[in-house]
Amino acid sequence: QVQLAESGGGLVQPGESLRLTCVVPQSIFSRHALMAWYRQAPGKDRELVASFTTGGGTTYLPSVKGRFTISRDTTTNTLYLLMNNLKPEDTAVYYCNVQYRGSDYWGQGTQVTVSS
């Protein structure tokens, strides 16, 4: 079973930064795969935070644009989400996601809590 391994969450104060990491199995780390980060806050639906488009560009949730950056390292098969200037409303469980050849893969989630 293919699994994604996330890390990097934690408790931070408003204005601080975190970088989330997701190690993706080489078998699905393809330029043809769609890779993204989602989040789910308590009592809310899961929402798309950032993703790579099929053309290689990036898209962001409007509320995080300019603060978050999605990136990937093809040498280590790793997906990243750099989160700057974190706000309390960014508090959620963050998930990495890969869609490849009709299958949908998820990590176990990593908790991000922004609180003073």
Image: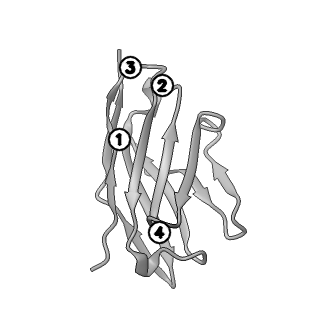
Say which residue appears at 47% left-offset and 58% top-offset: 79
Describe the element under mark 1 as helix, strand or loop: loop
80 to the left or right of 114: right
Residue type for callout 3:
Gln
Q: Secondary structure at mark 4?
A: strand
Residue in the picture at 59% in, 33% down: 67
Q: Residue furthest front?
A: 75
Looking at the image, is mark 3 or mark 1 nearer the viewer?
A: 3
Q: Label 4, on which residue?
A: 98
Inter-mark Cα distance, 4 to 3: 30 Å
The nearer-to-camera label among 1 and 4 is 4
39 w.r.t. 102: above or below: above
Determine the CA span between mark 2 and mark 1: 18 Å
Position of the N terminus by quadrant = bottom left
Circle number at residue 43: 1
Q: Position of residue 71 (x, y in %)?
A: 56, 53
Can you give x and y, in whole percent of width and height, for residue 94 in the image? 39, 47
Mark 2 or mark 1: which comes first in sequence? 1
Q: Which residue is pictured at 45% across the width and 23% down the height?
A: 16
Name the residue type under label 1: Gly
Q: Secondary structure at mark 2?
A: loop
Residue marked by disc 2: 87
- Whole-percent x and y of residue 112? 35, 37
Residue for badge 3: 13
- 102 or 75, which lies in front? 75
Q: Earlier in the sequence, mark 3 or mark 1?
A: 3
- Closer to the eye: label 2 or 3: 3
What is the CA distance from the residue labelled 4 to the residue labelled 2?
A: 26 Å
- The span from disc 2 to disc 3 (Cα, nearest Å) is 8 Å
Mark 1 in CB contact with mark 4 (< 8 angstroms): no
Q: Quadrant of the C terminus?
A: top left
At x 65%, y 40%, the residue is 62
